[in-house]
Amino acid sequence: MRGIVWLKIAAVYFVLGTGLGIYMGATDDHVLFPVHAHLNLLGWVSLALIGLIYQQFPALAGTHLARIQFWVHNLALPPAMLALACYLRGNQSLGPILGITSAAIGVAVVLFAVNLFRNLK
């Protein structure tokens, strides 16, 4: 899985994060600012940087760790953002889902670091 896939998914998160920012500005409702920030940082920026790194160092992208990291990150981030949005709007019952998905994203970040340190020569 080369860096191109990461970059394309990063672009989707960039559109979502920017769209949410435009919505918040147009409605003057900034309650979802943390969702906007996380979409842009954990989605757009992080995945774009990972994609560029994997494009520059294709051996890293082809590892089992990279594949696991890809799926953990991208399966956890959307429900984390939905849970965060609901939580910020007052649905406190989604706190455990937010915690679990946030921990999964943290695992994906650690997998990236392990992959980098273990396989970048």
Image (cartoon, rainbow, N blue to C red):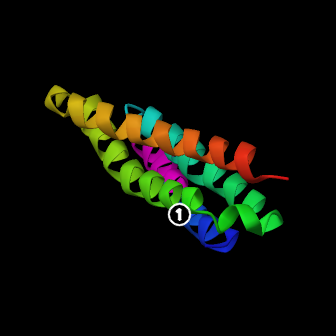
As rendered, which of 30 and 50 lies closer to the eye? 50
One can see residue 29 in this view: no
* Residue 11 in the image, given as x and y percentages of width and height: 60, 64
| Amino acid type of the residue that numbered disc 1 sits on in the rendered structure | Arg
One can see residue 105 in this view: yes
As rendered, which of 63 and 2 lies closer to the eye? 63
- Compared across the picture, whether 117 is left or right of 56 comes to left
On screen, residue 84 above or below 92? below
Which element carries disc 1, helix, strand or loop? helix
* Residue 36 in the image, given as x and y percentages of width and height: 48, 42
On screen, residue 92 above or below 39? above
As rendered, which of 64 and 6 lies closer to the eye? 64
Q: Which residues are magenta?
A: 17-27
* Residue 65 in the image, given as x and y percentages of width and height: 56, 56
Q: Which residue is mark 1?
A: 67
- Compared across the picture, whether 109 is left or right of 92 comes to right
Q: How many marks?
A: 1
Q: Residue at x 30, y 46 (%)?
A: 82
As rendered, which of 56 and 65 lies closer to the eye? 65
Magenta stretch secondary structure, dominant: helix
- Compared across the picture, whether 90 is left or right of 74 comes to left
Q: Residue at x 68, y 54 (%)?
A: 50
Q: Residue at x 58, y 59 (%)?
A: 66
* Residue 49 in the image, given as x and y percentages of width and height: 72, 53
- Compared across the picture, whether 92 is left or right of 98 comes to left
Q: Residue at x 45, y 47 (%)?
A: 26
Residue 21 sits inside the magenta stretch: yes
Q: Quadrant of the N terminus?
A: bottom right
Dividing the picture into quadrants, the one containing residue 61 is bottom right
Dividing the picture into quadrants, the one containing residue 110 is top right
Residue 92 sits inside the magenta stretch: no
